Amino acid sequence: MSKAKTKTDFQAFLQKQGLKSTRQREIILDEFLKGGAHLSTEDLYLKLRKKHPSIGYATVYRTLRLFAECGIAEARDFGDGQTRYESSDLLEHHDHLICTVCGQIIEFEEPQIEKLQEKVARAHGFKIVRHRLEIYGQCPRCKP
Amino acid sequence: MSKAKTKTDFQAFLQKQGLKSTRQREIILDEFLKGGAHLSTEDLYLKLRKKHPSIGYATVYRTLRLFAECGIAEARDFGDGQTRYESSDLLEHHDHLICTVCGQIIEFEEPQIEKLQEKVARAHGFKIVRHRLEIYGQCPRCKP
DNA sequence: GCTCCCCTTGAAAACGATTTTCAATTTATT
DNA sequence: AATAAATTGAAAATCGTTTTCAAGGGGAGC
């Protein structure tokens, strides 16, 4: 999905929900798409503040939640106490390798794991909606 | 690991760290081992309060953190806003199937998935410390 | 372009889970 | 029993996040 498409998707979502397109929402979406993956609300707020000091913390929170509702972003919690958001642009489907020393996050895909998950779910009569697989450890640079 | 062993392990941990064995810690550990898996701090506090109304909320929080530090429990976050603790007794190794409708949590093991994780980690030069795999969906009873 | 209604905003207050503070108490050691 | 240090419960503080509220802004219909 391209950035342009994401933007029009968001506009369409706003319209459909009877919500409004505002300057702030445009600015926040731009910065969100520009910034790397796994941004926390605070990360994004601090970035935004440089160019747009008048944007409020609450607005950033509200807008990111909106992105998640509309499906252009996904919320993640890696256990550091902050919710992080990931653009659905990038997110074909992948899981995460997380270095517990330096915090680096690497994304990976492994279709065989997905298949095995399906198998497990089926065995328990579950219908999978989503899943989350995170591997925590030490990256090459941080290994002893 | 038996419950008796867990208790002596905890005593040993306390001694080694120069901490003290107290009535409250005994009571909380007993209740924790008795109660099912995936207890939140509040769950445990409410259970304890019936027999021991004088035990404080903060003590339960502190003691569960202590269990986690000492390795007899593991903290988990399933995204409902509360930290849940799981006794390492039970925890050979397993992952979780979580029903997003009724909240039921089913544990499962799938050694092939573990092997694939090893493969992925190796490919990125990572040393795995721990991982977490959660499958969210609808259980047989809650499926439409 | 103007109006009106409703949505959105920023700032501050409220929130819920968890942590810390503090004075009083308990534990382990002598 | 005396002592020193750790622990407790209650209340206050803290953290990320959400809500409230009054003021401001968007856009559909005129």
Image: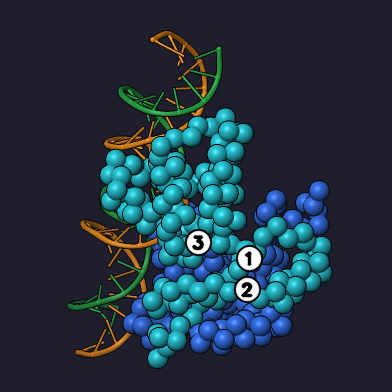
Chain colours: A blue, B cyan, C green, D orange
The amino acid at mark 3 is Asp
User: Foreground residue, D3 or A80?
Assistant: D3
Residue matched to label 2 = B109
**Which quadrant is the N terminus of chain B positioned in?**
bottom right
Q: Along the polypeptide, which appears first: circle 2 or circle 3?
A: 3
Q: Residue at x 40, y 86 (%)?
A: B141
**Which quadrant is the C terminus of chain B positioned in?**
bottom left
Q: Residue A93 vs residue B105: left or right? A: right
Q: Residue B104 vs residue A39: left or right? A: left
User: Is disc 3 placed on a helix, strand or loop?
Assistant: strand
Callout 2 touching callout 1 (CB < 8 Å): yes
User: Is disc 2 placed on a helix, strand or loop?
Assistant: loop
Residue matched to label 1 = B93
Q: Along the polypeptide, which appears first: circle 2 or circle 1?
A: 1
The amino acid at mark 2 is Glu
Residue matched to label 3 = B77
